[in-house]
Image (cartoon, grey):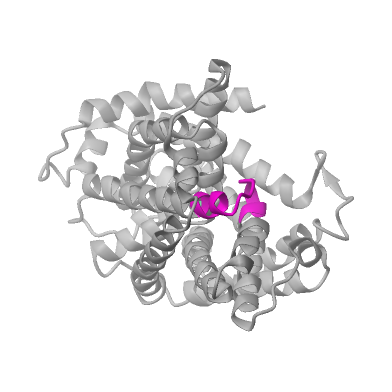
């Protein structure tokens, strides 16, 4: 089978930025930034993005393009015995997909509800046994339908219009939110640096680091997989700047949008799903044409979520296609059925299966902890060690510079980061989160 390719580098950027821009930007970033010292968090986040995020993104892209393989095959073909590192990434992508599609299902439900004009109570809805499961299955099915169309015909085609549409909606909503009376309080909460207690700093750093990785989709083989469909002429250092930049613009704008609206209505900025599914509906219910704004908002969230979930499924699909030489359709069907099943258990853990605990947590929470605290840091750490010590420096340099044809001014900085700084920081973050 001939390996597929992106139609253009722009198509790749849209798809990779689509993978990066997701629920992490919309519900995690605003909340974390607000809670963890406003501008202090934002500054540390930006510093980590430049110091660690962009270099690791570049490593994943280079590894993917160099080998033209799925994550397991990519590591294995550079150095025998290292395929397991890619395996951790593939497994992590699968685990994330299981809970991501449950939340994707909630987003779909709210999108339909705002269109129809009757908004459910979140606690009643999420704990019921049927509705959220059906929406989770619908969301996974939509992800499947895009992925089976392939790289240029499915993922690239969708991402190329979804991402610009998401930007347009985000800008419209942000302009509106900022014009609400009292909105400035929210912007100040987000951007003004404040730190009452210097002891909070380590926690802020750890959280910012995890957020950079999750937001850029690092450590899950997604960028390796997308990079494997890149052609030789595309400029990796350029991509490593543009993709984080787009991701960060979305995070900052959604921070401004959500916190402006929350403060304009004197509400509490809560974390996680509460922000999207409890707080935002209260705001829409008080706005003129609230159902319209609500529908627009949830279309945007849906766009963000689906382009991320297709990247997660594609990681597993690429692995299955390469390893077992099976057709894309079957390679997508197998994980999708498993996601149906495991996601259903995760969804039910908000209700009837709430008492079943794995390692002390309900199923949904267990999956998020497994991916965020263990699999992702392990895979990112090993990626650094691999690029810094195992893969020959000359070959990495050649891949990044297209055989010496394009400049790479940050060579020394890049190798310093992947060899020393990033593994050390990831290790510290990992140990302190135990
Ligand atoms: N970056 C996505 C977000 O911010 O929501 C989540 C994600 C998608 C992580 C795809 C990893 C991945 F491979």
Closest to the observer: 168 or 174? 174
Q: Quadrant of residue 158?
A: bottom left
Q: Is residue 312 above or below residue 149?
A: above
Query: Horizontal placement of 130 versus 368: left or right?
Result: right
Query: Horizontal placement of 329 versus 62: left or right?
Result: right
Query: Where residue 31 sits: x, y (%)?
Result: 56, 44
Query: Where residue 413 sits: x, y (%)?
Result: 26, 26
Residue range in magenta is 258-275
Residue shown at 23% from the left, 42% from the top = 400
Residue shown at 64% from the left, 83% from the top = 116
Main SS class of the magenta portion in the image: helix
Work out which quarter of the rendered image holds the N terminus and state it: bottom left
Q: Quadrant of residue 153?
A: bottom left
In the current view of this chain or complex, which residue is farthest to the front? 181
Query: Where residue 417 sits: x, y (%)?
Result: 34, 27
Residue shown at 88% from the left, 60% from the top = 352
Tell me if residue 272 is in the magenta stretch: yes
Tell me if residue 145 is in the magenta stretch: no
Q: Is residue 273 above or below residue 372?
A: below
Image label count: 0
In the current view of this chain or complex, which residue is farthest to the top? 198
């Amino acid at each position: 089978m001939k390996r597929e390719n992106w139609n253009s580098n722009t198509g790749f950027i849209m798809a990779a930025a689509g993978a990066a821009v997701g629920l992490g930007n919309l519900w995690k970033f605003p909340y974390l930034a607000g809670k963890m010292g406003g501008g202090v968090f934002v500054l540390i986040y930006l510093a980590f993005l430049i110091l660690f995020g962009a270099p690791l993104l570049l490593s994943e892209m280079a590894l993917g393009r160099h080998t033209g393989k799925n994550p397991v095959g990519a590591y294995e073909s550079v150095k025998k015995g290292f395929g397991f590192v890619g395996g951790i990434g593939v497994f992590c992508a699968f685990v994330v997909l299981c809970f991501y599609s449950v939340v994707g299902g909630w987003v779909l439900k709210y999108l339909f509800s705002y269109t129809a004009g009757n908004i459910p109570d979140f606690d009643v809805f999420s704990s019921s046994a049927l509705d959220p499961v059906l929406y989770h299955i619908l969301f996974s099915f939509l992800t499947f339908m895009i992925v089976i169309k392939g790289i240029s015909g499915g993922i690239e085609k969708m991402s190329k219009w979804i991402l610009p549409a998401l930007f347009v909606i985000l800008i419209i909503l942000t302009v509106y939110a900022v014009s609400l009376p009292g909105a400035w309080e929210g912007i100040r909460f987000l951007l003004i640096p404040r730190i009452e207690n210097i002891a909070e700093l380590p926690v802020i750093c750890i959280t910012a680091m995890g957020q950079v990785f999750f937001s850029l989709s690092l450590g899950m083989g997604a960028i390796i997989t997308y990079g494997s469909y890149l052609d030789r002429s595309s400029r990796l250092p350029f991509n490593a700047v543009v993709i984080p930049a787009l991701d960060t613009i979305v995070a900052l704008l959604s921070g401004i949008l959500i916190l402006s609206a929350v403060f304009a209505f004197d509400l509490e900025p809560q974390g996680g799903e509460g922000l999207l599914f409890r707080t935002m509906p209260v705001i829409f219910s008080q706005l003129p044409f609230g159902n319209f704004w609500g529908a627009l908002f949830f279309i945007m969230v849906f766009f963000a979520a689906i382009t991320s979930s297709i990247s997660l499924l594609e990681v597993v699909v690429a692995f299955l296609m390469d390893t077992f030489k099976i057709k894309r359709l079957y390679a997508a069907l197998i994980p999708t059925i498993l996601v149906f099943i495991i996601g259903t258990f995760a969804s039910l853990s908000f209700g009837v299966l709430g008492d079943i605990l794995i390692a002390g947590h309900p199923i949904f929470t267990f999956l998020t902890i497994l991916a965020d605290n263990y699999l992702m840091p392990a895979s990112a750490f090993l990626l650094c060690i691999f690029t810094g010590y195992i893969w020959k420096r000359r070959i990495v340099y050649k891949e990044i510079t297209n055989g010496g044809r394009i400049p790479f001014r940050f060579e020394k900085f890049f190798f310093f980061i992947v060899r020393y700084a990033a593994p050390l920081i990831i290790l510290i973050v990992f140990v302190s989160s135990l």
